[in-house]
């Protein structure tokens, strides 16, 4: 019984998040447009030489993805905290980490996946060739879920604090650094002929560790924040 | 059934109460009294397991609620100061989601029926953010009709409700108690609920 109802609860949490996002499309679109605009500013600032742009492209796209992920983190739990639904989620007869995982998965679908899907457009804009673009998409597909997972811990810890938005950036951005290094590094090392397997493996490892560890720590953070 | 042993609650540097003991059996109502700031909401949140007690224990069927959280939550419905409904979703959607989150699938007819009993017929499809304060409270209270939990913990359930809704809620609580349920509530209003046993705990004393 309990596994069936856990699955039902997991799925309805996902449906709930997507339904809520559909009612407030602006929130989803802000993240995506922020990403597109930040990357598009670089050619204007650095200059239109394709050689330079191609060199900085992976780093620029990855930094923009980190900042876009930060932008959407603030709302991950705060809306539910304000209207009392988070209390009700804590009182569900299921493991809180599984509920958190469902919420984070929805967060990735709504804020991470669009970045992955639009990254080829930005890659072309910055003069990357097709191999590099495919690789960039793979690194983003592996890296952005880890960003959502790690960010959730920060969002849970800063819940209900004044200026929580800035604080969450200070807490979480340092933890994003390894993902940034290996994500952007994969494309560079492939173009210099070293192959990207090592970078991709490490990114995958980050993702798996985050998948196992962060839902538990986020659940603990939420319990502390609501105490 | 529900047993509170030597409970102590501290907020910041301030001790709200200590050495609080009581038990609640099936079919009993506990009316929690106290002045503003006496710690009523803190006690209710501790009883739900949302807040950890500074000392003492809350036991459900003899087992500490901190270690048997899932089992305890399955028997519990908590209605706090905040209604716990999403303003962007309609009343039906809110109730559908909250019940499927707790693992129950409900038919739309059942939900419509509960909403019309709460006096919300014709308002089911509006986003709840356009409803009045009292109507939002009614949506939250409709959860009581739809769940089959044993223990209801209600924090000021009568606020923002009109006379009819207050009467209906009192009858609903009475019915729940007759069916061997348990209710813990706080209110500053006078309550006349038909209850077999009505206990009172005064926190200001």
Image: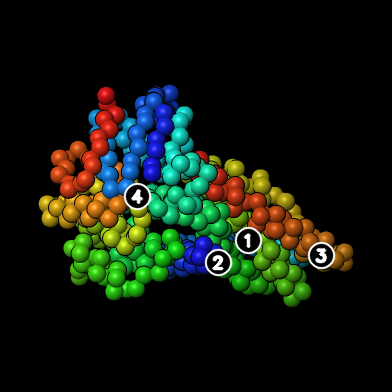
Q: Do labels 4 and 3 share a chain?
A: no
Which numbered circle lies on residue B151?
4
Q: What residue sits right under mark 2 in the picture?
A: A109
Question: Badge 2: few (under 14), some or many (20 or more) residues near its Cα, within 10 Å?
Answer: some
Q: Quadrant of the C terminus of chain A?
A: top left
Q: Could you tell me how far apart the alpha carbons at marks 1 and 2 are, in whole angstroms?
A: 9 Å
Residue A79, horizontal then vertical, whole percent: 41, 53
Q: What residue sits right under mark 3 in the picture?
A: A196
Give A24 or B106, whichever is nearer the viewer.
B106
* Residue B100, visible in the rendered structure: yes
Which residue does the image show at 74% across and 65% down from the upper left?
Answer: A54
Q: Could you tell me how far apart the alpha carbons at marks 4 and 2 are, in whole angstroms?
A: 37 Å
Q: Given the current orientation, which residue lies at the most extreme left position?
A: B163
Q: Could you tell me how far apart the alpha carbons at marks 4 and 3 are, in whole angstroms?
A: 57 Å
Q: Badges 4 and 3: C-beta atoms under 8 Å apart?
A: no
The quarter holding residue A23 reads bottom left
Q: Badges 1 and 4: C-beta atoms under 8 Å apart?
A: no
Q: Are marks 2 and 3 on the same chain?
A: yes
In which chain is the residue bearing label 3? A
User: Which sits earlier in the primary sequence, circle 3 or circle 1?
Assistant: 1
Q: What residue sits right under mark 1 in the picture?
A: A145
Which residue does the image show at 25% across and 65% down from the upper left?
Answer: B114
Tell us which disc is closer to us: 3 or 1: 1
Give B164 or A113, whichever is nearer the viewer.
B164
Residue B143, horizontal then vertical, whole percent: 31, 59
């Amino acid at each position: 019984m309990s596994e069936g109802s856990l699955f039902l609860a997991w799925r309805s949490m996902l449906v709930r998040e997507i339904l809520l996002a559909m009612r407030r499309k602006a929130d989803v679109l802000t993240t995506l447009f922020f990403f597109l605009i930040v990357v598009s500013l670089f050619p204007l600032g650095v200059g239109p030489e394709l050689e330079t742009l191609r060199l900085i492209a992976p780093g620029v796209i990855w930094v923009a993805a980190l900042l876009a992920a930060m932008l959407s983190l603030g709302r991950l739990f705060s809306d539910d905290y304000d209207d009392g639904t988070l209390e009700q989620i804590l009182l569900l007869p299921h493991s809180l980490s599984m509920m958190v995982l469902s919420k984070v998965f929805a967060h990735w679908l709504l804020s991470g996946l669009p970045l992955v899907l639009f990254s080829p457009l930005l890659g072309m804009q910055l003069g990357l060739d097709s191999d590099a673009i495919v690789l960039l998409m793979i690194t983003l597909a592996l890296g952005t879920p880890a960003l959502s997972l790690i960010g959730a811990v920060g969002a849970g810890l800063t819940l209900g604090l004044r200026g929580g938005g800035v604080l969450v950036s200070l807490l979480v951005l340092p933890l994003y650094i390894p993902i940034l290094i290996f994500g952007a590094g994969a494309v560079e090392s492939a173009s210099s002929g070293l192959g990207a397997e090592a970078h991709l493996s490490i990114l995958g490892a980050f993702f798996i560790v985050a998948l196992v560890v962060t839902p538990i720590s986020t659940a603990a953070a939420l319990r502390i924040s609501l105490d | 059934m529900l047993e509170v042993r030597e409970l102590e609650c501290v907020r910041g540097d301030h001790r709200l109460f200590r050495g609080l003991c009581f038990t609640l059996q099936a079919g009993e109502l506990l009316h929690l009294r106290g002045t503003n700031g006496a710690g009523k909401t803190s006690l209710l949140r501790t009883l739900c397991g949302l807040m950890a007690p500074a000392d003492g224990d809350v036991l459900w069927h003899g087992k500490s609620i901190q270690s048997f959280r899932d089992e305890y939550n399955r028997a519990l419905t908590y209605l706090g100061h905040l209604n716990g409904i999403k303003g962007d979703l309609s009343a039906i959607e809110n109730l559908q989601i909250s019940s499927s989150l707790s693992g129950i699938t409900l038919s739309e007819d059942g939900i419509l029926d509960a909403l019309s009993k709460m006096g919300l017929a014709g308002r089911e499809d509006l986003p709840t953010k356009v409803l009045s304060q009292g109507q939002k409270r009614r949506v939250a209270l409709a959860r009581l009709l739809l769940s089959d939990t044993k223990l209801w913990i209600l924090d000021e359930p009568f606020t923002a409700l009109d006379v009819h809704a207050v009467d209906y809620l009192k009858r609903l609580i009475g019915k729940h108690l007759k069916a061997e349920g348990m209710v813990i509530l706080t209110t500053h209003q006078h309550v006349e609920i038909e209850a077999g046993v009505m206990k009172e705990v005064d926190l200001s004393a």
